[in-house]
Image (cartoon, helix red, strand yellow):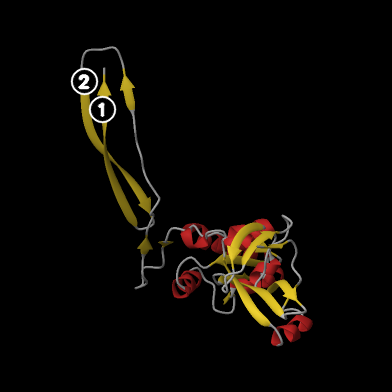
Amino acid sequence: MIIIEKVLGNIKQDSTWQDRKKESQVDILRLDQHEAQKSRCRKHTEKGQDLGIALDRNVLLADGDVLFYDEITHTMIIVEISLRDVLVVDLSHLGTMPVDAQIRVSFELGHALGNQHWKAVLKENHVYVPLSVSKEVMASVMRTHGFDETAFKFVPGGEILPKMSRSEARLLFGGSEETHTHVHVSPQGHPYSHSHDDHHHNHNHDHDHNHSHEAYHEHSHEHRHGDQTHTYPHSHDHKH
């Protein structure tokens, strides 16, 4: 096993490492967006090399990081991270708008993101939202809430990760694909999707009293999302 305690450089940011790569036998350590958030883990490279990652807690691996280099054998191990794209909303123009317009735009954006239960990070006049449904659906939601194509774009997650703190990176990439689909777009022919795989409504009422009769009844609760209503029938046993 090779113990990795620091990052040597990054081939995407340093021309020196780019030149060394051309003359090296390159091995790849592939990480998904969950693994990239860990400063300590054990994993094998594509060629089977056993690596023990033991970085400082405030260090996040980035796509293109060089973890190992041997000048004699000219072997190199590079990180490749598979990250989802990120929806980036540019709010830098708000400063030129009247206060009432700033409030309206901010409200519309908050409504759009909150209505979909989308995670988001606000940083330096930009809002970053991890891709949780298709780009087409996310773009449709943004347009429905008054944001045209010039106000947002989709950027590869690998370009966004270096800009984020550890906690921000965890929010964006630490499980965005597990976000329940919850899309409410305008009714003018756009798709409507609603899925909660881990969303349960559990009503359990137990009443136990020292009386000699029993009662049983059924009723239902309505759970409303936008234009759709879901009814959840359930029952209660009352023992007296």
Q: Residue 237: give its label.
A: 1
Going by the numbered disc 1, the residue's amino acid type is Asp
Q: Position of residue 93 (x, y in %)?
A: 68, 73
Give the residue at mark 2. Answer: 214
Evaluate whether residue 64 shows in this view. Answer: no
Q: Nearer the viewer, residue 131 or 72?
A: 72
Number of marks present in the image shown? 2
In the rendered image, which quarter is residue 81 located in? Answer: bottom right
Q: Position of residue 84 (x, y in %)?
A: 54, 70
Mark 1 nearby-residue class (10 Å; few <14, some 14–19, many ≥20): some
Q: Nearer the viewer, residue 85 or 103?
A: 85
Q: Position of residue 109 (x, y in %)?
A: 56, 64
In the rendered image, which quarter is residue 47 located in? Answer: bottom right
Q: CA distance from mark 1 to mark 2?
A: 8 Å
Q: Quadrant of the N terminus?
A: bottom right
Q: Residue 114: give its label.
A: none
Give the SS element for disc 1: strand
Q: Quadrant of the C terminus?
A: top left
Placement of 127 over or under 204, stated as above or below: below
Evaluate whether residue 203 shows in this view. Answer: yes
Q: Locate residue 170 relative to residue 137 in the image: left or right.
A: right
Q: Locate residue 37 relative to residue 208 in the image: left or right.
A: right
Looking at the image, the residue that sits furthest to the front is 72
In the rendered image, which quarter is residue 24 located in? Answer: bottom right
Residue at screen point 71% across, 63% down: 4
Marks 1 and 2 in Cβ contact (< 8 Å): yes
Q: Nearer the viewer, residue 151 or 211?
A: 211
Give the SS element for disc 2: strand
Going by the numbered disc 2, the residue's amino acid type is Glu
Q: Position of residue 87 (x, y in %)?
A: 56, 71
